[in-house]
Image (cartoon, helix red, strand yellow):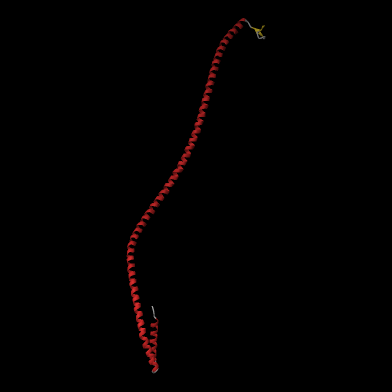
Amino acid sequence: VEWYQAKDGTFREKLPYWIALSRAEDADDMEIRLRRVETELATANAESLALQQAAERQRADLESQLAELKQQLSTEKELVAGQKKLLEESEAARSQAVAQLAAMTTAAKQTESELARARGELQSAAAERDALGISSAELQKTVTELSAARDAANAALATAQDEVTRLRQAAAVTKKPEIQDEASEQKEGEEPDAAGKDALKDQNASATPEDSDTF
């Protein structure tokens, strides 16, 4: 076996020519394959780099789209929340409006009923007023007649009282001398009997009130 020192300083076995030639040819083939493989590797690396760049760009685009979608989702959530709040407020306002409408309807019916009752009372009052107007006229007439009758009765009563007073005074003036004469005669003569005494007492009793009656 023969050895030789290679350029890198290592000792290697010296091969026979035909083996060396065969290995040289294999080396050439391997070099060709290596170049093809290197070319393919470079192409693959380039394609991989392109794919990586495209993936980066796609990832960036997806992230951008995702951010936009998140923003849109947030906006949609806010809109939905706002619409829900508006819906709740609208429902509350509708309920309140329905309640107010019911209350207004009830109040309107009550007002209409009170108005009808007031109209009836007004008509009754008008009828009573008209009746009172007629009754007032009749009452005034009756009062006037009664006043006239009262004045006439007062005048007649005054006249009668004056006449009675005059008659009493005349009767008193007439009876006093008679009573005095009878008393004198009885003193001069005999005592009067019981009947005469009673008559005298009756005369004196009837004469005394007449003298004292005045108006």
Q: Quadrant of residue 211?
A: bottom left
Left or right: 82, with 153 as reference point: right
Quadrant holding the N terminus: top right
The residue at 36%/56% (across/down) is: 122
Q: Residue lying furthest top in this view?
A: 17
Compared to residue 57, the image places residue 28 above or below, namely: above
Compared to residue 85, the image places residue 33 above or below, namely: above
State whether residue 82 appears in this view: yes
List x then y, in percent, for residue 199: 38, 89
Closer to us: 34 or 148: 148
The residue at 41%/50% (across/down) is: 107
Left or right: 209, with 14 as reference point: left
State whether residue 195 appears in this view: no
The residue at 59%/7% (across/down) is: 24
List x then y, in percent, for residue 29: 57, 9
List x then y, in percent, for residue 59: 53, 25
The residue at 61%/6% (across/down) is: 20
Quadrant holding the C terminus: bottom left
How many numbered marks, from 0 up?
0
List x then y, in percent, for residue 6: 65, 8
Closer to us: 45 or 143: 143
Q: Quadrant of residue 42?
A: top right
Q: Residue lying furthest bottom in this view?
A: 190
Compared to residue 129, the image places residue 168 above or below, namely: below
Closer to us: 67 or 123: 123
